[in-house]
Amino acid sequence: MRIGIILIVLILTLTACSGGSKLNPMLDASGKKFVLMEVTDLGQVSQLTGADSPNKTDKYALYGTDLGSMINAEDRTYFVFGDSFGERPPDMTGGGGSLWRSNTIAYTTDKDPADGITFDGMITDEIGLAKELLPSVKVDYDEMTKIPTHGLYANGSLYLYFMSVNHWGDPGKWDVNYAGVSKSTDNGQNWTQMESLKWPGDSNFIQVSPYKVENDDGKSEAEIYFWCIPSGRFGGVQLMKVSESNVENLGEYRYFMGLDDKGDPLWGTDMKKARSVVDDTAGELSVVWNPYLERWLMTYLKEGRGVVIREGLTPWGPWGEALDLVKASDYPGLYAPYMNDRFIGDDGKTIYFSLSLWDPYNVFWFKASLQK
């Protein structure tokens, strides 16, 4: 009888530990405080795309493009671009030009971000030009384009999250039909849209930044967290998650509903009841775990101010105040600041990120130092 009681107590203790977030510092705010004081040493390292870049992407008929979110898949990193164009007049500002493709992808095995990123190649068509991966109708007020917002590698496949844009409106505003997902099982060469995996166009889950969190016990499967904003650049950040094995099942996605009386996160299935984790006007956000701070980092465009950075204690917060990363006054027409935890220096004290500039409508590589 005594042995049985001891076993029961031991089982209950182990169950309580394995069921909580205390094992994983990424998910535990206990005893933490904000440590990020400022960001210094901002600098442009290189240009990633265009005829003037070291990658000379004009050889793929890619003279102008934007975005540049990244997916790590084994030894490769994929750079995912938005509306891409062939030849353009030299004085042209913004999107436009010949051979319009709604989306393109470059890939690299370059692991040294300090001198820029050298592409190994691009996903191309049969004649060697950068290939449109997710076809779009290209009709205004129908489907103007399909813009990839971010992607991930799970279960041995690539997943690309995108928004079907109905109409580009005033600056920073646009309407979408829905947010969707396409899947590739052949290293990005071909993509199949998953018709059962869509979020409504008026929801807060249109543009996403995913991050896979491994379970420290080595037994439970990884969970993928998605920080999400609506269409445009004037919405707040909400949070959803799903286990890696269920990434294709919309019914298995769970939405952050706030905190219980113990400060633990609540999750539910009704996206309309989701709570914000950051109340701000966020555009093109990116979230990674930073090993130097041992905190989460979030970057996004704040219209009129520029690119800002926030520090988070857990995926659901609390999140610190927005600090300036790149000022709009220094780089007019900036947007889409995307980080990647593979590209850091000094154990994470130096961060690298892609950044789009409306003029000359190409993607650039930046770095900055974190001070704590």
Image (cartoon, rainbow, N blue to C red):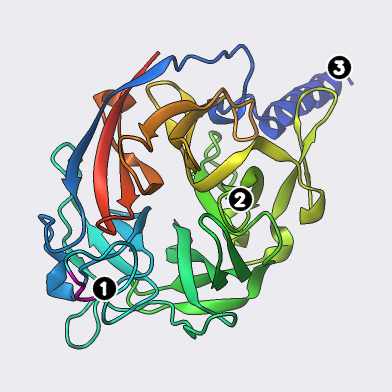
Q: What whole-number distance in Å separates the C-alpha atoms at marks 3 and 2?
A: 55 Å
Helix, strand or loop under label 2? strand
Q: Earlier in the sequence, mark 1 or mark 2?
A: 1
The answer to whether residue 40 is visible is yes
Q: What whole-number distance in Å separates the C-alpha atoms at marks 1 and 2?
A: 28 Å
Work out whether residue 332 or residue 128 is closer to the camera in this orientation and state it: 332
User: Taking 97 as reference, is 197 left or right?
Assistant: right
Q: Residue furthest front?
A: 91
> Which residue is label 1 attached to?
123
Q: Amino acid at mark 3?
A: Arg
Task: State whether the magenta stretch is mostly helix, strand or loop.
Answer: loop
Return the x and y of residue 52 as percentages of the image width and height: 11, 58
Q: Which residue is rendered at x = 31% and y = 51% of the image?
A: 357
Residues at circles 1 and 2 in contact by the CB criterion of under 8 Å: no
Q: Amino acid at mark 2?
A: Ile
Q: What whole-number distance in Å separates the C-alpha atoms at marks 3 and 1?
A: 65 Å
State which region is magenta: 85-89
> Which residue is label 2 attached to?
229
Q: Earlier in the sequence, mark 3 or mark 2?
A: 3
Residue 2's disc is 3
Work out whether residue 325 or residue 214 is closer to the camera in this orientation and state it: 325
Work out whether residue 180 or residue 109 is closer to the camera in this orientation and state it: 180
Work out whether residue 167 or residue 2 is closer to the camera in this orientation and state it: 167
Q: Amino acid at mark 1?
A: Ile
Residue 88 inside the magenta-drawn segment? yes
